[in-house]
Amino acid sequence: MIGRLNHVAIAVPDLEAASAQYRTMLGADVGPPQDEPDHGVTVVFITLPNTKIELLYPLGAGSPIHGFLAKNPAGGIHHICYEVDDLLAARDHLLAEGARVLGDGAPKIGAHGKPVLFLHPKDFNGCLIELEQV
Amino acid sequence: MIGRLNHVAIAVPDLEAASAQYRTMLGADVGPPQDEPDHGVTVVFITLPNTKIELLYPLGAGSPIHGFLAKNPAGGIHHICYEVDDLLAARDHLLAEGARVLGDGAPKIGAHGKPVLFLHPKDFNGCLIELEQV
């Protein structure tokens, strides 16, 4: 069912410093910051040859990243995203297998403009998993 | 400098359950458990089209995974691994830029039989980064 690893998302306490670090210390291809007001994040995309790293920084008072950074002041890996061909079929299969989907179970449009769902980290080894339809 | 994302390593409290979950719930290509006594882990490799997930479970009393699971009983993402062409050049560049390499700074042979180094998570947004020479 799951296909490619679309990205690893890392919440960071200082987006400029983290971008500079990936660019200069790690020599990666680091894009400009992009505000995603619908998701409460500013994102920097780091393009690797086979996948992406996304640096996440809170945007706005209601950002879901505030709580994560309060618990992890140095930052940390926030979620991983797997691609699926058919998000509704994936959701129904997971629900039938007893997994929990966050929210009301209806796909949202994610930061890449594609439908996404998140799975409960307690059901998946403490990892927040995003599924993105590609 | 960094190339492909070689793998994402997830520490899990129950290797059999996590393997079954990735195989059945997520429909992934999940390998058999492999003991790596030199690294104090039993590993299950999950092959995605573009990278790997590695499930890590403690092997032996001195395993580095015991402490992680004590802090994260449900499990969690333990580290991410980036490939580099020249590990010693990468290390020297990172040290010159002020990053800290774990241990004595000498590469070890990693779980894939290739030279690896780990970077201090406090220097990299709370993420433990492994560099593997490919």
Image (cartoon, coloured by chain):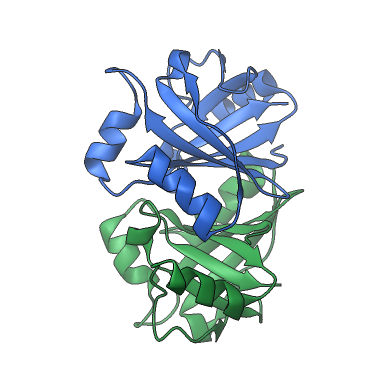
Chain colours: A green, B blue
**Rendered position, B10 above or below A120:** above
The residue positioned 60% from the left and 30% from the top of the image is: B131
- Quick one: A59 or A128, which is closer to the camera? A128
- Quick one: A89 or B99, which is closer to the camera? A89
Q: Is residue B97 visible?
A: no
The residue positioned 46% from the left and 53% from the top of the image is: B21
- Quick one: B14 or B109, which is closer to the camera? B14
Q: Is residue A105 visible?
A: yes
The residue positioned 38% from the left and 51% from the top of the image is: A125
Q: Quadrant of the N terminus of chain B?
A: top right
**Rendered position, A133 above or below B79:** below
**Rendered position, B45 above or below A57:** above
Quarter-of-image position of residue B69: top left
Determine whether, in the image, residue B106 is placed left or right of residue B65: right
Location of residue B6 in the rendering, given as x and y in whole percent from the top left corner: 65, 38
- Quick one: A21 or B75, which is closer to the camera? B75
**Rendered position, B89 above or below A23:** above
Location of residue B120 in the rendering, given as x and y in whole percent from the top left corner: 43, 33
Determine whether, in the image, residue B82 is placed left or right of residue A69: right
Location of residue A62 in the rendering, given as x and y in whole percent from the top left corner: 35, 83
Location of residue A118 in the rendering, given as x and y in whole percent from the top left corner: 47, 71
